[in-house]
Image (cartoon, rainbow, N blue to C red):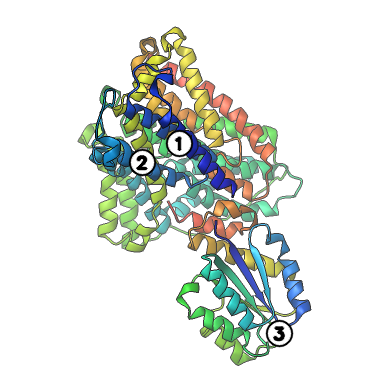
Amino acid sequence: MEKIYIICVEDQREVLNTIATQLSSLDQYVIIEECESAPEAEELIEEIDTKGDFIAVVVSDHVMPGKTGVELLTTLHNDQRFSDTKKILLTGQATHMDTIQAINMAGIDYYLEKPWQADDLLHKIKILLTSYIIQKGLNYKLFLEVLDQETLFGLLKQTP
Amino acid sequence: MTSQAKNFILSLVVAIAIVLIPSQYFPLAQLSVIEQRVMALFVFAAMLWVLEPIPIYATSILIIVLELLTISTSGINVLIDNQGDHFGELIAYKDIMGTFASPIILLFLGGFFLAMASTKYRLDQGLAKVLLKPFGTRPKMIMLGLMIITAVFSMFMSNTATTAMMLAILAPVLTCFDEKDPGRIAFALSIPFAANIGGIGTPIGTPPNALALKYLTGENNIGFGEWMAFGVPFVIVLLAVAWFLLLKFFPPKAEHLALEIKGKFMTSRKAIIVYVTFGLTILLWLFDFVHGMNSYTVAMIPVAVFLAFGIITKEDLKKMSWDVLWLVSGGIALGLGLEKSGLAAHLVNSIPFDQYAPVLIVAMAAILATIMANFMSNTATANLLLPIITAVGVSVMSLEALGGAKMLILATTLAASLGMSLPISTPPNALAHATGMIESRHMSKVGVTLAIVGLVLIGILMYVLNKVNFL
């Protein structure tokens, strides 16, 4: 059975821990991975893809040493293999230009500004996870507990 | 090893054991090799559908492929050559493959086209809005309205899609309810129950009904309109019972409820074509005695119209629920194997059904169907039971007085739609349970009561149908 991953990228350890804790209610159903830099995330993504598992959501900080979050998400966006993978940019220091780039070049699905509400992040991730699972044709019945109902009902009613 | 792999291997081992046991150990005289293989296949399919180590539609395809390999005229040579005594008749491979394009499948495909086009052109939302208006703002009445709309829609759309649509409408309202108001539970339960019950109303309402048509051949044949003539009254009564039960068990405390349905009827040319075609198809289904086309032929008309006008596009075509169609194909193929090999008749003849009171046989069949359907897919239940039940109906003479095979098939089919007491019983139940508004025990409380009432109603319905010489 293939596994579903949610990847969190953030260079500050404490913040990364916070994100992971806020998502911990999902970890019975999906695997939450923590990465401290973009290259580390890319390596992990390759590894997961080779195993044939699924990367549903990538949550990334923007300002990180080396490769920035927007750059990471842009690379991901341009990779056919991850065309369905959902992208969240979680940042407090993005400039106007960064933001434009995030939308136009990285095709992000959601922009969350720091500081953020735990509920907000969790809710958004559930929505994105739901559409990912339906898009990929995975068995949604196994994930009902962690899916966003509104999104699920909306998508399901379109299939006769 | 995962539990899924274990369950698959267990099923496979049991199936192989059945093939390998020497035939004289079976309590069936003169069991042919082919019959023995079909028996193994039947048990294999039953175990896979119950334990679900692989998706239920995959089991169906597995049945078809295994039949082709082991009992068809185009099977593996070492398995089908050197026929000794008691080998039995091979089944034509074209007949097995033909199950993919059985008229039943095409009838369902027609239903899918209607459902998809009506969702795409907002016929469903528009209708829901118009139909709900007269029910006012009192929660009890709104619930009745929602249940009627859900039931009517699920007669033509899949029960799952209908439930998803109605829950999407209902969900924002439910969150406004006071947390302690039992009405929340009543509302959340009303949708899946209404969807499951509504499916009984037409031959395309739910796959078991279409499958029943497969077995209702010759003089037992039933038209679309004939089915609705008894199906719809049955739905109305059971729906009323469900409404009453929900209000009794979980009376809503709120005084007012405002339900907002977004979306209006569309007015584009394509939308008009959809609305007209939808109405016309249903009229053609109902008035088959006027024009002579059977329901299968009629079902192809919307398919052609919607494709020709670009209402259903190539992308939409890919989104059709082929899994449901193939699930049914596998059931038809299993039935074909059981019938053509002679195993169904053989099995039934070896059990002295004539010694039992005919009423008892019907009751047992219906109760068995309901119990099975609670724990596995309703369609899989029908896939497994209907071939055997048909053989019973045809061979047990004492059933004639009650309506014969036709009555037994109908009773079993309707009973297969009554399995709705657990979240796993049907997809609508699972979706409603996922709202978090209801606990399993709430669902069971109403579901079990409804099943018992439903079974009694089936008894009454069959009695009446027999009295009016329909059976």
User: At which x and y percent is residue A136?
Assistant: 49, 62
Amino acid type, residue under disc 1 in the picture = Phe
Disc 3 marks which residue?
A92
Left or right, B181 with reference to B171: right
Disc 2 marks which residue?
B66
Q: Residues within 10 Å of mark 2 (few under 14, many from 20)?
A: some
Q: Chain of mark 2?
A: B
Looking at the image, can residue B26 be seen?
Answer: no
The residues tagged by marks 1 and 2 sit, at their Cα atoms, a distance apart of 11 Å
Asked whether the residues under the numbered discs 1 and 2 touch, taking CB atoms below 8 Å apart as contact, a structural biologist would say yes
Residue located 68% across and 70% down the image: A121
Disc 1 marks which residue?
B44
Q: Chain of mark 3?
A: A
Q: Residue furthest right?
A: A14
Q: Earlier in the sequence, mark 1 or mark 2?
A: 1
Q: Out of B262 and B424, give the one closest to the viewer.
A: B424
Q: Residue furthest top?
A: B355
Regarding mark 3 in the picture, which secondary structure is present there? loop
Residue B425's quadrant in the figure? top right
Amino acid type, residue under disc 3 in the picture = Gly
The residues tagged by marks 3 and 2 sit, at their Cα atoms, a distance apart of 59 Å
The residues tagged by marks 1 and 3 sit, at their Cα atoms, a distance apart of 58 Å
Residue located 33% across and 18% down the image: B30
Regarding mark 2 in the picture, which secondary structure is present there? helix
